[in-house]
Amino acid sequence: MGLTPIDIYNKEFSRVLRGYSEDEVDEFLDEVMEEFEKLYKENLDMKDALTALKEQMDSYKTMEATLKETLVTAQQTADEVIATGQKKADLIIEQAEDRANRIIEEANREVIMLKKEYEEIKRQMQIFKGRFKTLLTTQLEMLDAEKIDLNEED
């Protein structure tokens, strides 16, 4: 383990005959201890701050991962919604086309039926005209024949 301010404060030096002045050494050691204590506390504070920042960074990384997952999920959901919408649109178009085709087919059948009816009515009209013309001709001939008979009787 490293040197602590208490270690500096409690350090005792052995005495020698021609050593340094005890008061000066004690005074210097006190200054060193005070400076070392400041640096030691600052170092502890910085370690705490670093730990807090690491925790915050881990929290942000977790948040980032969650956001990425959320974005991927949102994109997948959007893709699914678009695909589902496209399928529904395709189905609606297909149903509309089928219905339109059925309506057209029914209309074509009706047109064909109406044409047949028209042709039948036209044919019957020709027959009627022919018969009526024959009837009128016959009636005129009969009238002419009676006129002749009437003229002969006079």
Image (cartoon, rainbow, N blue to C red):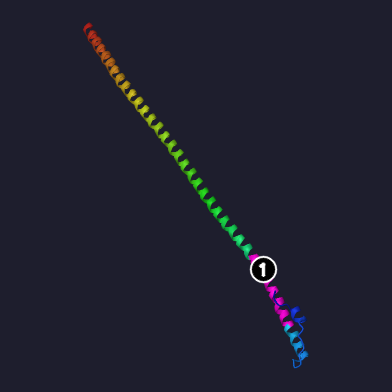
Q: Quadrant of the C terminus?
A: top left
Disc 1 residue type (three-letter): Thr
Q: Name the image quarter holding residue 112.
A: top left
Circle 1 crowding by C-alpha within 10 Å: few under 14, some 14–19, many from 20? few
Q: x and y percent of residue 149 in the render?
A: 23, 8
Q: x and y percent of residue 141 in the render?
A: 24, 13
In the rendered view, tell whether residue 154 sits above or below residue 7: above
**Residue corresponding to mark 1:** 51
Magenta includes 75? Answer: no
Picture residue at 38% right of the left edge, 32% below the top:
108
Q: Quadrant of the N terminus?
A: bottom right
In the rendered view, tell whether residue 81 sits above or below residue 117: below
Picture residue at 58% right of the left edge, 59% below the top:
65
| Element carrying mark 1 | helix
Picture residue at 72% right of the left edge, 82% below the top:
35
Nearer to the camera, 16 or 30:
16
Nearer to the camera, 131 or 41:
41
Magenta includes 49? Answer: yes
Q: Name the image quarter holding residue 45.
A: bottom right
In the rendered view, tell whether residue 148 sits above or below residue 1: above
Q: x and y percent of residue 46 in the render?
A: 68, 73
Q: Main secondary structure of the magenta part?
A: helix
Q: Is residue 111 left or right of residue 17?
A: left
Nearer to the camera, 73 or 120:
73
Q: Which portion, as a residue range, is magenta?
A: 33-56
Q: Residue furthest left?
A: 152
